[in-house]
Amino acid sequence: MDAIEREVISYLNDTYELAVALANNSGRSRPGAQDVLKACEDGDLPVQDLKRVMKRTAKVSRSSVPMFKPAPKRRRSPELLGSDESSAGEENPDTSKTEKSKDNSNKPRTLKHLPGQLPDLPPKHSYMRTSTSSAPKPSLSLLDQQLERSMLVQSSLQNIVKATNGTDTTPQHDLLAEVVNWETVGPQAAENMKRWNI
């Protein structure tokens, strides 16, 4: 049985390769039905034999073939989203297409001059931009209070800078003597120069 299966597979592969070669020679990218028939004739399987096989298979009962039932129809999704409320003067989404084409009174006044073969307007969410909620503007009294606070902080900082500029700004080396190992050198060493011990 395996030998027969291998022979059938080999024959079908050879037939397909011949059909592909015929299609390539004809300038087509894929083989068509005519290429397959020509490949069968070249492979010693005439078209009349294929017709007889087709008639025999048509007579065979197809009761063993499972019949699949079509899937149930889906509910139609709504045409409008929740954000697309229909306002006055626009089309009612509950009316059918035939009613819409018969009755143009639902169209907005600005669109009544358009011919009926044009499509309906798309849903609102696809072309309308909703305004974002802007931050509340501060009142004038609140702005005055913020200005007074900033001026108070500015004057306090100026007073601190003036108070610290009046004192001696020379560094006190004795505070760092325990932390850093350094010794002074020369007559001005206490003020300017340091030599580090390594």
Image (cartoon, grey):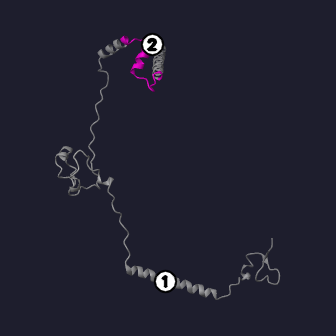
Most extreme residue toward the right is: 186
User: Horizontal and vertical percent for residue 146?
Assistant: 44, 80
Look at the numbered disc 1 and give the secondary structure of its residue: helix
Give the residue pinned by disc 2.
Answer: 42
Look at the numbered disc 2 and give the secondary structure of its residue: helix
User: Horizontal and vertical percent for residue 139?
Assistant: 37, 78
Instruction: Say few, some or many: other residues with alpha carbon within 10 Å of mark 2 (under 14 / 14 to 19 / 20 or more).
Output: few
Is residue 35 shown in magenta?
Answer: yes
Q: Which residue occupies 34% across, 13% down?
A: 51
Give the residue pinned by disc 1.
Answer: 151
The answer for how far apart the CA atoms under marks 2 and 1 are is 102 Å
Type of the residue with mark 2: Asp
Query: Looking at the figure, which quarter contains the C terminus?
Result: bottom right
Q: Mark 2 or mark 1: name the one nearer the start of the chain.
A: 2
User: Horizontal and vertical percent for residue 117?
Assistant: 23, 44
User: Horizontal and vertical percent for residue 21?
Assistant: 48, 20
Please state which of residues 78 and 31 is positioned toward the viewer in this rendering: 31
Instruction: Say few, some or many: other residues with alpha carbon within 10 Å of mark 1 (under 14 / 14 to 19 / 20 or more).
Output: few
Type of the residue with mark 1: Met
Is residue 129 shown in magenta?
Answer: no
Residue 120 left/right relative to 21: left
Which corner quadrant of the image does residue 195 belong to?
Answer: bottom right
Residue 139 drawn above or below residue 116? below
Residue 133 drawn above or below residue 58? below
Magenta residues span 24-49
Residue 110 drawn above or below residue 38? below
Which corner quadrant of the image does residue 127 belong to?
Answer: bottom left
Residue 34 left/right relative to 123: right
Q: Which residue occupies 71% across, 84% down?
A: 170
Please state which of residues 76 and 132 is positioned toward the viewer in this rendering: 132
Q: Which residue occupies 72% across, 83% down?
A: 172
Q: Nearer the viewer, mark 2 or mark 1?
A: 2
